[in-house]
Amino acid sequence: MHSTSASREVSAVPVESGEMSFLDRYLAVRQTSMQLCAPLTMEDHSLQSMPDASPAKWHLAHTTWFFETFVLSQFAADYRPFQAEFRNLFNSYYNAVGDRPLRALRHVLSRPGLDEVHAYRDYIDEAIVHLLSFDPDPKSIELTTLGINHEQQHQELIVTDVKNGLWTNPLRPSYRPAAEGHEPASALAAASPLEWRKFAGGVYSVGAEDDAFMFDNEGPRHEVFLEPFRLASRLTTNAEYLEFMRAGGYSQAELWLSDGWDAVRSNQWSAPLYWEQRDGEWWHYTVEGMEPVAMDEPVCHVSYYEADAFSRWAGARLATEFEWEIAARSCAVAGNLLETGALHPRAVRSGEPLAQMFGDVWEWTGSAYLPYPNFKPAAGAVGEYNGKFMCNQMVLRGGSCATPQSHIRATYRNFFPPHARWQFMGVRLANGNQ
Ligand SMILES: [Fe+2]
């Protein structure tokens, strides 16, 4: 049951337009989740290769649960749940909602079956359309908007969790077939030379304005002082990262943070996730199966520890999240995002002064994920959305090839623990010597 229409160049998902009504946008986002699951077999839908990842079927159900729990149960008069037990079954981490199954055991939920989860989605969509068609409470619109953005986050997780699950299979099955006529990228191509962009020091305002949708962790807007800094004109490439590997980067303790060195040794890391050597050449797993590593593409699937060690080896460092945000403000929110259908980072093709700021790979920053001054989580259960994770995680910026375009912006703060590698995560250097 593989889709034959998907390709690296053709959009696999509907492109949202600014002209869309709110309900059309809701329905388009819901449809995108289904389309991302279209190439999966029934068995693929239940894959969970590690506790951090969730089965695609669970993502389809949990995103639906979010609308049922936070919108319909609160605002739809006489609402009857699709299945009362789902309130706990598909809860992810909201203590205020109640108990939930162990995260690592989401793959045991063979029931409800996929057909029933699809029926659950249809039931909720109908109820949301009904609720929002008749003079809805502004708070219900606000929570539906949060639900739309929540579902977009899970769309990215569907891609990365499925990629990890399929890769775990020794057969390395692809998520979708390679597009007809698609040639694997050249292993020898060179990227455009890296240049350094200068930014003046001073006091800057950072964080989101309150006038459009933002997650609570993007505010309040506040002032920060920055020293002058320089940012690489593009992402770090596979060629550059391979130089680090060949120079013994993974065997020199002095390049690594203590926790990073422990992670290298205990996990026996010697290359980015999904890389393997075949006859002396590096290959990596992509959504279209194993391919030779293209040297001009951005390095991807590296942890914070690897990004940090690489930048130290390169005589540079990672940008802080505020340096990144100030630089990104001058860039259009465009790039190799979910809508290109590539689901894989691409080499720089344009002569933009600051390329690849949005899309391709999330960029690790050197900033710990902390609350902004005067941050207050929202009241009620949705206050658990972001705030309670502000410990032991690093901030990533800019979105990836699996992030919907309408979901990303310069102020957006993603966060993962420093050892995580299965998201589309990469490196942009700051303050280098060259
Ligand atoms: Fe969630």
Image: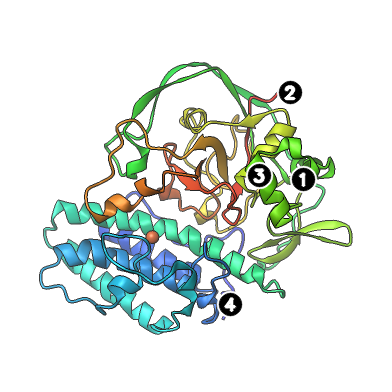
Q: Nearer the observer, disc 1 or disc 3?
A: 3
Name the disc covering residue 196, or none: none
Q: Which residue is mark 2?
A: 434
Q: Are marks 2 and 3 in contact (CB under 8 Å)?
A: no
Task: Please tell me which residue is depicted at 85% across the width and 57% down the height of the picture.
Answer: 281
Label whose residue precedes the other's in the sequence (1 or 4) = 4
Name the disc covering residue 260, or none: 3
Above or below: residue 126 compared with residue 154: below
Distance of label 1 from label 3 (alpha carbons): 10 Å
Which amino acid, mark 3?
Gly
Of 75 and 357, nearer the camera is: 75
Q: Which residue is mark 1?
A: 250
Q: Counting other residues with Cα less than 10 Å from the Cα at mark 3, is it few (<14), some (14-19), or many (20 or more)? A: many
Q: Nearer the observer, disc 3 or disc 4?
A: 3
| Side of 238 where 101 appears, left or right | left
Label whose residue precedes the other's in the sequence (3 or 4) = 4
Label whose residue precedes the other's in the sequence (1 or 3) = 1
Name the disc covering residue 2, or none: 4
Q: Are marks 1 and 3 in contact (CB under 8 Å)?
A: no
